[in-house]
Amino acid sequence: MSHQQNTSISEVLLIKYLAGEASPEEALAIDEWIERAPDNDRLLQQYLQLWSHAGKEGTYIAPDLQRELGRLNIDTHSSKGPGKKILLKPTSFFRIAIAATLLLALGTGLLFFLRPGETATVRSMAISRPDGILYDTLADQSSIVLTPGSRLEYPASFTGAHRTVRLQGEGYFSVTPDANKPFIVHTGMLGIKVIGTAFNVHTTTDSVTVEVDNGAVLFFDSSDSVIVKGGMRGVYYVDAHRFLVTKMESGNDYAYATKVFRFQAARLETVVRALEKAYDVKIILENKKLADCTITTAFNNMPIEYIMEVIAASLSIQYRMDGPTIYLKGNECN
């Protein structure tokens, strides 16, 4: 089998991918292309930022990428007609030109995203709960899950160019795709613009963390932005005014919403904390040394009773439930 790198991709397919309209087969082809070479991934991210910021007054429309690059005298070696190919050999000049285009877009698009446009013209609503996890569905059929003490502000209907909400605390969003009306989560002076995805946002006084379950988001402030893709975590440090993107070890931080857990040699203390958050229970280790026991297992939307049975059998310990409180007892692990 030939190992020659495929250096071209259809612009039509690329735009469908960015708009979230690619079929599973087409998306897989793009993903395989990205993995072939680091330059492919870098070029996709350059186009993604151009796509995210392009358009008049922040309107989310597919930009004419060839026209924009041609205006900057960038030779993309493309042929005429639909389905033309873009050679994936970005030069230093290409990267500089893309950066210049982004700067122009930031002057209108990003500042537009940071202003509370829709809530100024429609009735504002809010949902919150002092205790217990809250599940709800917005007008566009996007689903949200809020942790106790969190608050979400949103318009009564999404009538503007964007679907804009404001979050305090922590929430998990599964957003209904709409390429013509992006979904934007604001928290303080930061924004998360959805390209079509499910993701978790956790805010504190020191940082804002975005964990992407699937898809991708644009995580931005007034002067900078990063792209966070599925399986990645983006953190903004308030004091340093800095973004950091890393790979997630698991999705257990937002399992309170998905009820999907993946534990790999995890300490029982860590497992307990994740289960308490997800099932609104209190788990007490009667023998404190049990905290150092480790377990490797996975659960997919199982009841807490089932999970406790598996943990108890795996670690040869006992458990009992007294209302919302669960007690674990047994000998320390070897």
Image (cartoon, grey):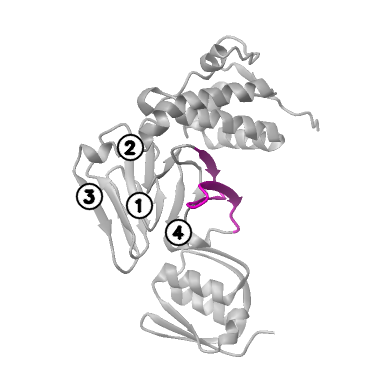
User: In the image, what residue type sits under mark 1?
Assistant: Leu
Q: Which mark is residue 258?
A: 4
Q: Upstream in the sequence, badge 1 or badge 2?
A: 2
Amino acid type, label 3: Met
The residue at which mark 3 appears reads as 125
Q: Position of residue 315 (x, y in %)?
A: 61, 81
Inspect the image, locate mark 4, and give the three-letter code of the amino acid beneath it.
Answer: Thr
Task: Relative to 9, say whether 247 is above or below.
Answer: below
In depth, the one of 291 and 329 nearer the eye is 291
Query: Separation of disc 2 and disc 3 at Cα?
Result: 17 Å
Residue 59 visible (yes or no):
no
At x 55%, y 89%, the residue is 287
What is the x, y in percent for residue 125? Answer: 22, 50
Are there few (<14), some (14-19), or many (20+) residues within 10 Å of tag 1? many
Farthest top residue?
80
- Mark 1 against mark 2, which lies toward the viewer? 2
Marks 1 and 4 sit apart, C-alpha to C-alpha, by 19 Å
Point out residue 203 in the picture as x, y percentages from the top left corner: 42, 56
Q: Which residue is mark 2?
A: 115
- Predominant SS along the magenta part: strand
Q: Residues within 10 Å of mark 4 (few under 14, many from 20)?
A: some
Marking on residue 167? 1
The quadrant in which the N terminus is found is top right
| CA distance for labels 2 and 4 | 31 Å
The answer to whether residue 200 of the structure is visible from this angle is: yes
Q: Which residues are magenta?
A: 224-249
